[in-house]
Amino acid sequence: MSETSDQRALAVSLGAMRDDELVRLFADREVSPTATWRDMFDAADALLDPASIGRALPALNRTEAQGLVDATASRTPLPPESRDALISRALAREDGTPFTAVAEIVRETFPDGIPDTEIPAVTSDPAPREAAAAEDAFTNAASLADVLLLALETPLGRIGSGSLGAGERRRLVETGAAVTPDDADLLVGLGAAVGLLGSNGRAWLVTRAGRDWLRKPTLDRWESTAAALRDALPSSYRSPDGGWVSAYLWAGAAPFDPTGPRHASEWIARFRAWGLIDTAGQETPWSRGLAAGGPAETDALRALLPPEVDRVYLQNDLTAIAPGPLAPHLDVRLRGMAARESRAQASSYRFSAASIGSAITAGETAESLRDFLTGLSLTGLPQPLAYVIERSAAEHGRVQVARDEASGLTRIRTDDATLARAMEVDQSLRSIALTVDDDADGHDLVTHVDRDVVFWALSDAHYPAVAVDADGRARALDRARLAPDESAPSPADVYAPLVGRLRAGVGDSDAAWLERELDQAVRTRSVVDVTVRLPDGSARVFRLEATGLGGGRLRGRDKAADVERTLPLSHIDGVALVD
């Protein structure tokens, strides 16, 4: 019985593995940590199940898959370059021959072998492709920044598959962060792949790394993301030196994976968007170092990027015009106090009382606004803009939100009775349940709702609110919801109980396997030849129809002698199924 011998061989192999090797195998094979396996024989049975093998094969790279297909076709051991990997994944015996169940699936999947993939020769002039790739890199770096800024304001809703909802794709297109809905999906997928976006299960949120990324210069943004993209590539696309193989090979890099071509097209689109490969699938001059496992060659890209500016023209109509791409850290801060109206080589921004008020809400002051804009402007600070800043700053803070340490309530203070009455009856504030504090001397309102929630509710309702501490000093509140830090337990911790249970089940492997074979024979009412060791040291073979197993004894019907025999397991040396 080859299947039976495979199970025993794998059980022995599993028992000889270190704990970390078992953990890696279980993780690779997507074994449930709650599997009810009692011993290594149970584990071997499960790992040789066709469903489990079907989950393991798609993870094989082309070299491993080719070795498995060739060994199966020729019925010879695996070649050295793939042997250890396939043995460690429980797909082959220690001698390098594929397990029977594995070979059957391999023959069914590739009866004529794995089709070859060719890398076409490209002879066209690379200069236009490189210029286009550099433009894509610059444009998509800016677009990704727009996506992150929008996600900081409002998380991007996602559907069950993890993709953006239709409404979110439309929002990204309408705000100019993406040109098409497909571009929106591409940018979000790219950001998630490199850790700039994370998920809470219902929405995409900016990570702490993503917020830090927004403060970097464009070339630094590109370089860190390019390296992260390479490192996030599926292992089947990677080369032994730490880089990647030709993009032409990605669609066939995991031959057993039916979704391979789709995943390859997603990664190719990300690499093209980031300027790592051009439209002909060739590495760009600045990505060749990355492709070889080293750093990016940013000087080659810098020469093709438009120069960034660090000054703008402030105009009397409350607009700002950047005469070129504004340095990212300046752009991010400027957009905190003005709405961007257009994004091109020359971007425009518009100030308003609402935008200045939002900046003050976020922590700016009249002085910090004046200092920043004066240093940024090529035309000084126009009087109309200075007036809006002064008026907004004076208006802002008429409503103070603080925690009342004595009562534990949130207290809203204002000297304006009309304003207090408006907040009390405002239907948009019903959720925070404001009530008048009759014991206060002024026009205070109180609520049981947390101070930060109250502050943002008032700000959203366009009240000139400011959060203050116990001493009355204004303090800035950060509204941005960041993605939760991922702290998933390590595979070693996840699989520790299962590995421990399997180790505890390890005893006399020969006796355990014998009992397992007899149990299977009893369940199938099979006829078996049982070799029994007699007291005088001789051996005798009984041909029995196995009928029962328990109490350390095997019961079976000896048809030749027409008797029921009971044999002690301790005296049985072997068992063989009769065909």
Image (cartoon, helix red, strand yellow):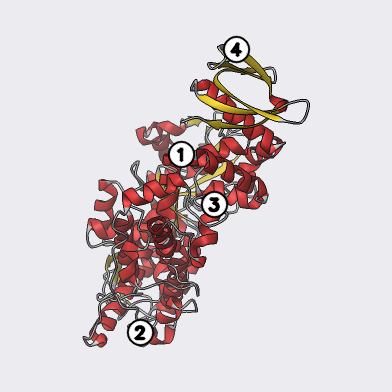
Residue 549 or 266: which is nearer the viewer? 549
CA gap between label 1 and label 3 equals 15 Å
Q: Which residue is drawn at 46% across and 39% down?
A: 49
Q: Are marks 2 and 4 in contact (CB under 8 Å)?
A: no
Query: Mark 3 or mark 2, which is nearer the start of the sequence?
Result: 3
Query: Mark 3 or mark 1, which is nearer the start of the sequence?
Result: 1
Numbered disc in front, either 2 or 1: 1
Residue corresponding to mark 1: 49
Q: Position of residue 33 (x, y in %)?
A: 57, 38
Location of residue 44 (image quadrant): top right
User: Mark 1 is on which residue type?
Assistant: Asp
Q: Are marks 2 and 3 in contact (CB under 8 Å)?
A: no
User: Mark 4 is on which residue type?
Assistant: Glu
Q: Residue at x 41, y 66 (%)?
A: 237
Residue 507 or 438: which is nearer the viewer? 507
Numbered disc in front, either 2 or 4: 4
Residue corresponding to mark 4: 564
Residue corresponding to mark 3: 93
Residue corresponding to mark 2: 307
User: Mark 3 is on which residue type?
Assistant: Arg
Q: Where is residue 133 in the image (x, y as percent from the top left)?
A: 29, 77
User: Mark 2 is on which residue type?
Assistant: Pro
Q: Position of residue 516 (x, y in %)?
A: 60, 30
Query: Mark 1 or mark 2, which is nearer the start of the sequence?
Result: 1
